[in-house]
Amino acid sequence: MGTTGPAPALPDIEPVATLLRRVRAELSAEFLPDRPIRVSRAPGRLDVMGGIADYTGSLVCEYPLDRAAAVALQERDDRDVQVFSLNLSDEGKPSTFRIPLDALAGHSPDVLRRELNQPGRKWAGYISGCLVALNAHAGAIGRMKGGVNLAVYSTVPLGAGVSSSAALEVATMMNLAAHLGLIPDLRSEISNRNSLDGVKIAELCQWAENHVVGAPCGIMDQMTACLGEPGALLRMICQPAQLLAPVQLPDGIRVVGINSNVKHDVGGPAYGRTRCAAFMGHRIIFEKMREMGRAAEKHLVTDPMSGYLANLDPDDYKNLFRSSVPEHLAGREFLERYGPTSDAATTIEPDVSYAIRHATDHHVLEARRVRRFVEFLEKAKASDGAKRKLALDSAGHLMYASHQSYTMDAMLGAEECDLLVSMLRRREPLGIYGARITGGGSGGTVAVLAGHSDRADGAIAQVMSEYEQRTGRKPELFSGTSPGAWHAGTAVV
């Protein structure tokens, strides 16, 4: 988006403009020309630092991209929800899903998840799940006079680790909430008691993905899609969503993403096992704390970590608790000793062996890496010359350490992403400071901290060309930025 002059109207911004054009050309039988259409838009995100540590309470740094999902809504006369995907089905072709509002209201999330988890239907869970979440929060379905048509189109690549699902959810949730009058009117002194703010929008989207889609994601993706500011890193402590002032990048520094074109899946087994193992580690450490309290004649009832591994001092972890965390433990044995964990988004499988110490190592140490990363960026902003270069190098090296931990401890690495990071690191003298695998790992996108210069541009282009030659996969560069959905709002055309 432009940096000078007034921002273009929402209907003129991509991919909203393309969505409206295709709705009028391809869906004219369903979207009636004499009725208003409400449009909304939410961006994907580049996970610069933090990644999967969001669900253990870490600080995260996220960058809103110019790639986005767009949603068009028009009211229907009947009580059905009909959803049109222009490019989100498994084959990338137009697809349709239809369900009565009363069925959405009457089925449990588990029943809906099973019904929607069918070939060619899963994309619809992200959209209909938003209505289920709104209904649970504000009785949305009972407030609706008629059903709705929803058409969706996205330029956020699926499976690239840049949060295509959160972009779709937030764009849908913003549109539905505005349609139902749940977005607060700042001109009014009295607002509906069910009014939603940007944080609540994000929380409801996360609930939909966790409970209706069945993907155990944290909240950083939805928060960035909703509240991200263009050109800055969204800074948030995920406990559960403490939004801090955005991190402004030092002059002449940018972040970009390189899509490896290896698809990842946050609902896949590796992601779920790592998440489970982290919460198992938390439970074991808490029990060790209780044991130490009893030895000191103190009765420990509340969790000193307040429910988050990120609050455990890394030195205390290494010196006092790490030896008590087993490298591997079968789910059945853990359940017999400790019972279930506090994580509602995952279930321990009795016959699976969990790498608990590895996962705990990653989460405890990643939280410190992110804090120090921000400190070095801020030091670079306040410095020049050699001190600035040292601070940027230090921030970048923390990205490399995070990447290594994703592979060795979180066990969510990918050979292709390792190759990209290695090639980028060899080009540090050309203005590359750091790189890491992002989001849920196991493929997807590599985030890069780089100078804004012709030399850095050339280095990134060389890496992408060499990567394609060596792997046969065509990489994709993400370099633009745009505002989150809360800042863009919705528009009626």
Image: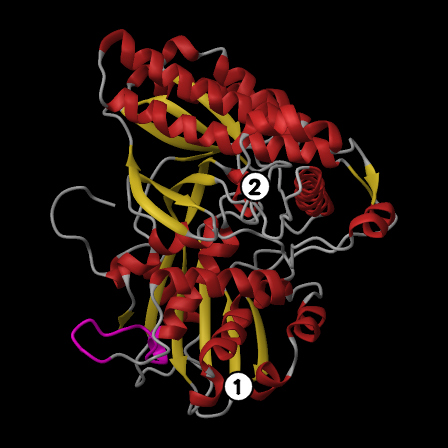
Q: Is residue 415 visible?
A: no
Q: Is tag 1's residue or tag 2's residue first in the polypeptide sequence?
A: 2
Q: Nearer the viewer, residue 393 or 82?
A: 393
Quarter location, residue 461: top left
Give yes or no for contact between labels 1 and 2 (Cβ–Cβ under 8 Å).
Answer: no
Q: Whole-percent x and y of residue 119? A: 70, 63
Whether the magenta-drawn stretch holds residue 95 is answered as no
- Bin the neighbour count of mark 1 within 10 Å (Cα to Cα): few under 14, some 14-19, many 20 and up: some
Q: Residues within 10 Å of mark 2 (few under 14, many from 20)?
A: many
Apparent side of residue 453 relative to residue 154 in the rendered image (left or right): left
Q: How many marks?
A: 2
Residue 293 x/y as whole percent: 66, 41
Q: Nearer the viewer, mark 1 or mark 2?
A: 2
Q: Relative to residue 110, is residue 305 depicted above or below?
A: above
Identified at 52% across, 81% down, the residue is 81
Residue that appears at 53% across and 31% down: 313
Which stretch did the figure color magenta?
178-190
Q: Quadrant of the C terminus?
A: bottom left
Q: Which mark is residue 321?
A: none
Q: Check residue 80 in the rendering and tell me which mark sits there, or answer none.
A: 1
Element type where label 1 sits in the image: strand
Does 98 appear above or below 13?
below
Mark 2, residue position = 52
Q: For the residue marked with disc 2, what is the amino acid?
A: Ile
Quadrant for residue 286, please give it.
Answer: top right
Q: Is residue 234 above or below residue 422?
A: below
Overall secondary structure of the magenta section: loop
Looking at numbered disc 1 in the image, what kind of residue is underneath it?
Answer: Asp
Residue at left 67%, top 46%? Answer: 279
